[in-house]
Image: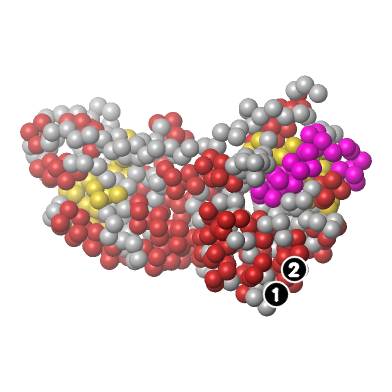
Amino acid sequence: MRTRDDGLAVPDALLFDWHGTLVDTHDAMFSAMEEMLPQLEDLGLVEHLLPEDQCNTPEDARLVRYIRIFRRLHPRILAERRVSRTDIFNAIFGDDREAKAIAHEAYNACYRKYFGQVKPFQEGIVDYLLACRELGIKLVVATNRNREFLDTELSTLEDGRWLELFDATVCADDVVHYKPDPEMIQSAADKVGLPVDAHVWYVGDGYTDMVTANNAGITAVFYNGSGWDPQKIDSWFRKQDRPSLVLESFESLMDELAAFPGGAFRRAVADVRPAAYPPPVTPQPRVEPDWHPAVAKLVRPEAILFDWHATLVDTLDAMYHAVDDMLPEFRQLGLMERLLEPEDSKTPEDARLVAYVREYAQLHPKVRADRKISRTDIFEVLFGDDQDAKAIAHTAFNRHYRNHYGTVTAFEPKVSQMLRGIRNLGIRVGVITNRDREFFEHELAAVEGTGWQHLFDTEVCGDDTPLRKPHPDQLILAAEKLDYPVGPRVWYVGDSTTDIIAAKRAGMTGVFFNGALWDLPWLHNIFPGTHRHPHKPDVVVNDFSEFWALVLACEVGPP
């Protein structure tokens, strides 16, 4: 019989994805991705990122937002190492073939520095593939990898043992379009002389692989070597894209083949299958911060003050351009000799940043790539309590910022709705920023095309008080403007250590907005709670949905 009772067709050919299915090239892939993503602006791809409301899943929307703002992969993806380059590009660019082609080309240029770091994804894969050959099944690799990379990896993997395993290989540069276009499947079937039908299985580890198989009309088989929860896998797929089969290991592939009736293959599965090998090791999940709103003891806010940059809005491009322009002037401004000494830095990372600026008069490439630290925090790291030095630096920054500012977007899509919701609860709302008023008022009027002037009861800028954050003067002034006493019923929400220090010095509730998704060890690093650095947030939120839930919980809680 050519089909099982459940309708699954006997495979005449097994087509395999390469990375994440047959082999593990995560080290090289993620190194290349981390090098390529900071180039998005220069490649003209930022404006091609998919609008969040058009993303397939909430996770994809958060990935788009994170890459748009920080030009790097979400920390969870880096920690879990389960997602492929192709799935990332399809998630963030959708059906924009031109954008994906540019992204793939840039990725390949970076990958050339790293490829060759390849190992079998699971122990015993070669033995399982040899068993499939004994059954008379054609074996093909169909991958979005370029041929120069695949051929090298095939020839070096396990001393070339893999070279004779496959009847054919099809790479991205052998066809016109990348997956999920079905052209690659058609080419693979042609190479082994088979029709494109259900008797051709495509085994892959990604969402894109399953869409590709279903677009081609063949059997889609999801290889769950990364240990995704079954409900998680199910949530990814529309009805027409669902896999026909989910495999947890190559041993389970043998089980599925053995379930076909006798005579389906050239030999009996029991005669050729190898002794069972253990399944792949499931990646450890990323450790989430335990500074959770559910356990925080907070009083209901009567007023909520927000930081501006990297909390409510994204102005990172202009900010980093201005910092890049300003740092080479430090020597002529007399600021090099005022940089902190290593023993005065809060953390070893801070000391290394100071040392790098002292030697090269520019930010360390990792700081620029991460895009997680504000201009104010940079100046705090460099100059500590030297107010005169920071004043000179802020003045120089403002001079360069005039050449770049103007582009401002909401940090999250529904920030303005959240601000309106807070006001509808009877809570007064203000914004505090170290940005000078000339810049802030322009950005406030420009955001979302219509401006947010109507959303705030008060605004305090960096040049409205003699001292900027981390001093509490701006926060105290905002409370005075609202005619509300300073205390824990005034919340200050910000994304930097500077914001939390200012809030705690003012006696307000400090809410750390962890939009950069620092992990727990790093949060403990930047908020050590020591005698010298005592200030810690009252609560940490990772996005504004968490923050909104926190406000509502306090709203219905005790007064």
| On screen, residue 10 above or below 373 | above
Pointer 2 residue: 392
Secondary structure under badge 2?
helix
Write down the quadrant of residue 425 in the picture: top right
Asked whether the beta carbons under mark 2 and mark 1 sit within 8 Å of each other, the answer is: yes
Pointer 1 residue: 333
Q: Does residue 258 appear to the left or right of 7 in the view shown?
A: left
Q: Does residue 34 appear to the left or right of 518 in the view shown?
A: left
Q: Please name the amino acid that badge 2 sits on.
A: Ile
Q: Which mark is residue 498?
A: none
The answer to whether residue 522 is visible is yes
Q: Quadrant of the C terminus?
A: top right
Write down the quadrant of residue 420 in the picture: top right
Where are the magenta residues, as a range?
479-508
Residue 163 in the magenta stretch? The answer is: no
Q: Position of residue 433 (x, y in %)?
A: 77, 54
Residue 490 in the magenta stretch? The answer is: yes
Q: Earlier in the sequence, mark 2 or mark 1?
A: 1
| On screen, residue 303 above or below 90 | above
Front one among 54 and 71: 71
Instruction: Count how many numbered circles sit on residues in the image.
Output: 2
Q: Please name the amino acid that badge 1 sits on.
A: Leu
Residue drawn at (48%, 37%) of the image: 287
Q: Position of residue 537 (x, y in %)?
A: 67, 39
Residue drawn at (20%, 31%) of the image: 255
Front one among 446 and 488: 488
Residue drawn at (78%, 38%) of the image: 508
Q: Does residue 47 appear to the left or right of 466 in the view shown?
A: left
The answer to whether residue 394 is visible is no
